[in-house]
Image (cartoon, helix red, strand yellow):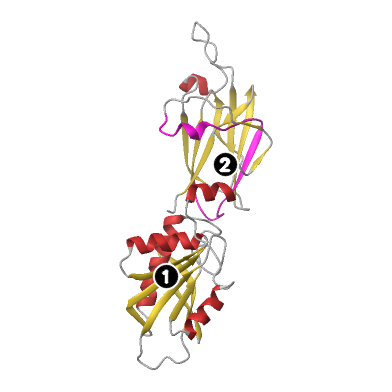
Amino acid sequence: MERPVSFFSEGVKLAGDLFLPNDLRPGERRAGIVLCHGYTGVRNLYLPDIARILNGAGYVVLTFDYKGWGDSEGPPARLAPYSRVADVQAALSFLAAQDEADPERLGIYGTSYGGATVVFVAAIDPRVKCVVSVVGIGHGARWMRSVRHPDEYFDNGVLTDEPRVISGTPDPNLYALERYGHFTYSIPVDSRGRYTVVLHFAELYWVPDASGSVGVGTRLFRVYCNGSTLLDNFDIFKEAGSQHALTKTFYHLRPSAEGKLDLTFDPIVNYATISAIEVIDESE
């Protein structure tokens, strides 16, 4: 027997389905299992088949969609690791509150990225008495590099990754890549949100001469976000010198109606440049 359910995680409404064994007697409580899908999965792809098999073995089973996936509310198609942990814990709380489930006998099952999530939840939540991870992610950073690229959503410009020694930052690797030229990044976001954007710069090309003056004014450019000026006549060297990290932060930026932050880097003198772009959802 299957019925649609909903519950909340961090104030966001999640959609789920509760699967009950056919031989469940009135007033009886059975061990419960939460099934967790992977990175881009949704609850109705393959989890119902697993739920029915577990029902046949006597378990009460809950499937659900993470925030922003499937039928759940929230910013669409995002991967927020700790938010997914919170979603699984909310699912456990919901399942434990059902009359058909025994709150002292709860387990969690996850596949792919969900396999990594359930291992983390089991380590921090004592309600979990059993955990199963199927083809789970063991090394998050290495896996993310295999499915995403460090430089995406751009149009035009040239990418260079010449190694440089950068000062003034706890993360010099962030400045290992540089895109230069006349270019735009169109970053997909929720069109309803407001965002903080942090731009990371370093002057990697122009260095001072013996007098220490050459470099100032040799690279000037503008930066726009959806047509609004963020920086004008911007001179990295003048503000930070050569091979030194410099950040600029902008708050409450509105995306386009299509759900894009269009960041345009417009040269005035020589090429525009950027090392990294950080986008922060202000609702979190």
Q: Nearer the viewer, residue 225 or 56?
A: 56
Marks 2/1: CA–CA distance:
32 Å
Q: Position of residue 199 (x, y in %)?
A: 51, 35
Circle nearer the N terminus (2, 1): 1
Report the disc number at residue 164: none
| Percent position of residue 63, x then y | 49, 74
Secondary-structure class at tag 2 = loop
Does the segment drawn in magenta span residue 119? no
Query: For residue 106, what is the image quadrant?
Result: bottom left
Look at mark 2 in the image and give the residue it sits on: 150
How many circles with numbers are drawn on the protein?
2
In this rendering, would 97 be left or right of 257? left
* Circle 1 residue: 108
Answer few, some or many: residues within 10 Å of disc 2's Cα (few below 14, many 20 plus, some between 14 and 19). Answer: few
Q: From the viewer's perspective, is the residue at label 2 or at label 1 nearer? A: 1
Magenta segment, which residues? 169-195
Position in image of residue 103 (x %, y %): 32, 77
Which residue is more in the foreground, 134 or 198? 134
Q: Secondary structure at mark 1?
A: strand
How many neighbours does mark 1 have within 10 angstroms: few (below 14), some (14-19), or many (20 or more)? many
The three-letter amino acid code for the residue at tag 1 is Ile
- Residue at point 38%, 80% (across, down): 31
Magenta stretch: includes residue 192:
yes
* Residue at the extreme top: 211
Residue 226 sits above or below residue 170 on the image? below
Q: Give the farthest residue toward the right.
A: 156
